Amino acid sequence: MHRTGELFGQYRTLEQQKETASLGMWIFLVQEILFFGGIFLAYTINRHSYPTAFGIAGNMLSLPLGAANTVVLIASSFTMAMSVWSAQTSRKALVTISLIATLLLGGVFLGVKVKEYKDKFDHHLIPGHGFDITYCSRNPAACHLEGKELSNEVEEIESGIKAEGGETALNAHAQLYFSLYFGMTGLHALHMIIGAGLLLWLILESRKGRYDANYNTPVENVGLYWHFVDIVWIFLFPLLYLINRHLV
Amino acid sequence: MQSQLPLYPESASNFAPDVDGLMLFIVAVCIFFAVAISVAVVYFFFRYKRKNADDIGVPIHGDMRLEITWIVLPFFLLMAMFGWGAVIYVDYRHTPADTLDVYVIGKQWMWKLEQPNGRREINELHVPVNRNVRLVMASEDVIHDFAVPAFRVKMDVVPGHYNSMWFRPTKTGRYHFFCSQYCGTSHAIMGGWVTVMEPDEYAAWLAGTSGTSDPVALGAKLYNDLACGTCHTPDGKGRGPSYNGVYGSKVKLADGSTVVADDAYIRESILQPNAKIVAGFQPVMPSFQGLVSEDQILALTAYIKAQKDQPVPGKPAAGEPATGKK
Amino acid sequence: MSGTQTSTGGEFKLPREHYLNATYGIRSWLLTTDHKRIALLYLASVTFFFFVGGIFATLIRIHLLTPAGYLVTPETYNKLFTMHGVAMIFFFLIPSIPAVLGNFLIPIMVGAKDLAFPKINLLSWYIYLVGGSFVLYSFATGGLDTGWTFYTPLSSIYSNSAVTPAVIGIFINGFSSILTGLNFLVTVHTMRAPGMTWFRLPLFVWAHYATSLIMILGTPVIAITLLLAGLERMFHFGFFNPAYGGDPILFQHLFWFYSHPAVYIMILPAMGVISEIIPTFVRKPIFGYSFIAASSIGIAVIGFIVWAHHMFLTGEATYAAIAFSFLSYLVAIPSAVKVFNWTSTLYKGSISWDTPMLYALGFIGLFTIGGLTGLFLACLGLDIHLHDTYFVIAHFHYIMVGGAVMGYVGGLHFWWPKITGRLYPEFLARAAAIILFVGFNLTFFPQFILGGLGMPRRYHNYPPEFQVLNVMSTAGASILAIGYLLPMIYLTWSMRYGKIAGPNPWPSTGLEWKTDSPPLTENFHETPVVDWEPYDFVHRPDLGLSGAKAPGKLAPAHGDD
């Protein structure tokens, strides 16, 4: 294992080594944009084709949980930036603390995501044979729906069946929405998990005092990655939760 | 050209002469360049063969004039090919009005074809010579492709879409047609023969219909069975628009745009009724997705098409609310 | 300089220490981060997949001897051509030149000790192996019968074969490609030796730079597309399924957005190889250096906006078809510029008839035919007739086999002395090159005519009037097979028994020829400083050729252009 700031064999200077690492990271992120691009395109086209079903399906997501997660992620971006800044200014203790904070916030995000997925499972919104967009309006108790919320939901589903021309069609198109929802947020969550692994590694390294003003490329690069993953969520949240939203 | 070693397919449709002319042009251009480059390469190869082991070549680094020449000159040739090809393509895609419509359904691994009078065939297609024929094609499962090399026509048949193509056979005879888009195990046997007949023979063949159902009659029966008439009353006063004379006409939609009521429109209106709402009506029709087969949609379309010589009562004038409202 | 490798009376000795004997043992290979060793690991693995794909190809050609096709059942035949395509495209052609020759040469050519990220380089080989294992698993457990294009809904719903592991394998393998491209891009940007300016880079490096752009921008799209198709198959997601309101045409758009540029991943590196071979064996600077370099980038960029020319018959809008046809014609121009410049380089050269040069000439001929027949398919009016016929098969084999594989085999011969330190038997090698050229044309030229006649691709049986041409094609394939087996045999033989090559046997002008053969693990004894222009034989007295002038006065960068 190399020591802090050591020059690897294939480089001539430390500057070259640093430049190489960050260029590599940026190119990797360009690649990531294209990777997410394919599924965003699929979303855009289908949203355009089936606006009603997508609106109804989007209303099934929990706005409070989604909004909370957005706040959590933005906070984690802030702590990540803190850790980069403290590494660059050689505040070694603060590096570790901010990294731990980032990891914790990332964990909170994933926890909330698990809760959301579980709700979708309980509400029969997992694509496949059991998928039923009308489940909640028919079994309000299972979804903890009552009063105004329930009547809104029932009305919503009824209007959807009418607009889409039948329950079969509404179900099919809503299922398409949830396929995309799980595809997109699942892919994002996978990136978060990888990011959490990277953070864990950084925390272990930074506790040894590795990162300071002379050498902080790993912190910087993981920071870039973490910000990128946050930005993806900043697009996912309005696309999935907010467009056409009228029920809370 | 029925030799052991045919080199080019027969020309049996209106497209064949155009396509073959273009083919000849591109072949000529390609042979010119291929020969020119090969001759140059081979000539240089012998002319400048190394004499002594330590010889070097004359250091020539490039020539701007040459570079410009071989960028600009090919560009014009390429644009000629592109333009010519595009003109022919537009012709392929521009279906004339007076076509004989044959409905084609592809499924793993057979073709079901249906003549306008309802005569059905499997893996056989009979058409009259010198008559514009349009194939309206749908797939029941995967993507297929209907290809007739002698006619130089080919079109994918995509599930969830209606694709159509047209041609005018110019020579009687029997020609192969193939499924050209790989569709699974028996893809290679999913083909058959197109028989081009003299018009009177075709009429006789068509009249020899026995045991086949008339699609208009079948459509009329479905119209009753599915209770379409509850809403789509012929007088246009029902909850849905009348389809008297609607086929081929321009329909004004609720969002202000207009569409031509063609096969694809009617199919969509049955399967996704609310994709296009006729001006003055409410989106109340249920979808028939899964309730009617592609065959039955064709029959319904044929029925709707047959109702064309009656005027459409109560057809709203532009900008006025429809009488059939509510 | 050539360091420890000395010539004694015309006979060379292998250097005392080089990358092959630096360390021993299986661990030293499996855990190596030396780009040269990783290149050899790739060489072994892509050769394996070439064999696998080649066996499928042989069975296909034998099966097609008779119209009724007695050898295998339709199910088996469909699996054969699918697995042939998957093995050859994803696991042989795409990694072949970049991962073997590119990996070995790019760091040396730019004067670096290694790629920018050696560990990532090793990682990408392991990713390739994991992806390859999934695909082999799919081949072994029921095979794959969707066609290499994986068109939905056939692949996502209707096929009964082992689609899921294959899709996972290709998805994983994509990251191998992405990481290789990333490594190359960063290396070219940051690892160049002093004096190695952008316009002194060998054209091989320019070609790989363009290739890497495609790998990075295209591969993630195919990865996500196949992932979506896999999810649809496994979990009934409905992205491409009309029954759920999805659209199978969307799959084709996403698929071709990568898979058309992927053709350029295969051909651009081969063009780079040819651009190295020709000046060496003609002993003069390449004609129009900057035009060849720029055309690589041009091909990569325009190559990204032509994908829908694979979909002219899906019912796409007429205007979209016209636009894509226009763009497809534009991409012909940079390819033509390369061919014209290579041909002009021969003018007033001092041409030797060594084996790599024979491959280069073969490449020019075959690539020209492949490229010109592309003009038929880009043409809207003709594509309708030729689409999905054997014309397409012949066209892309001329590009991928006649172009990419000829470039790969030619490049292997050209750099074999550098890789192994030894020469191959020249007579056998020339014979093999000629056999390959003849066999290739016999195999694939008849298929152009078959396509013109309308014989559809992927047919396990066919109407009897097509038989004569099919028999000709199969006969050619048997010659082609000999052409491939020969080099495999004598190249293997030469690793141990070949004549010692010396540092610069041809001689050639690139940096890779200024170090030992085989090179040190660190590539150079000391960091090289580049003070000469590319492909300049005149100001290079160190090459020992007549007509060379003293160094110091440099030739203009690239003539008067």
Image: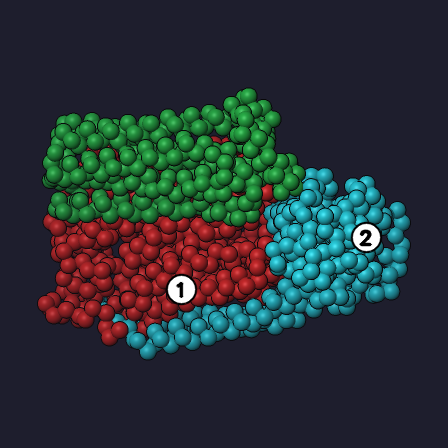
Chain colours: A green, B cyan, C red
Q: According to the image, label 2 marks what residue?
A: B234
Mark 2 falls on what kind of element?
loop
Residue B23: which quarter of the image? bottom right
Chain of residue at mark 1: C
Q: Residue lying farthest bottom?
A: B65
Chain of residue at mark 2: B
**Foreground of the two, B51 or B70:** B70
Q: Residue at x 23, y 56 (%)?
A: C505
> Can the viewer see residue A29 in this picture?
yes
Counting every numbered tag in the picture gives 2
**Residue C106 x, y percent position in the rendering:** 26, 51
Q: Residue at x 44, y 58 (%)?
A: C305
Bin the neighbour count of mark 1 within 10 Å (Cα to Cα): few under 14, some 14-19, many 20 and up.
Answer: many
**Residue C537 x, y percent position in the rendering:** 20, 66
Mark 1: which amino acid? Answer: Ser
Give the label on residue C262, or none: none
- Marks 2 and 1: same chain? no
Point out the image quarter for the N terminus of chain A.
Answer: top left
Q: Is residue C555 left or right of residue C268?
A: left
Bin the neighbour count of mark 2 within 10 Å (Cα to Cα): few under 14, some 14-19, many 20 and up.
Answer: some
Q: Is residue A107 left or right of residue B130?
A: left
Mark 1 falls on what kind of element?
helix
Mark 2: which amino acid? Answer: Pro
Q: Residue at x 53, y 48 (%)?
A: A48
Q: Residue at x 26, y 31 (%)?
A: A102
**Foreground of the two, A8 or A125:** A125
Q: Residue lying farthest front?
A: A148
**Residue B319 x, y percent position in the rendering:** 66, 62
Q: According to the image, label 1 marks what residue?
A: C335
Q: Is residue A188 above or below residue B19?
A: above
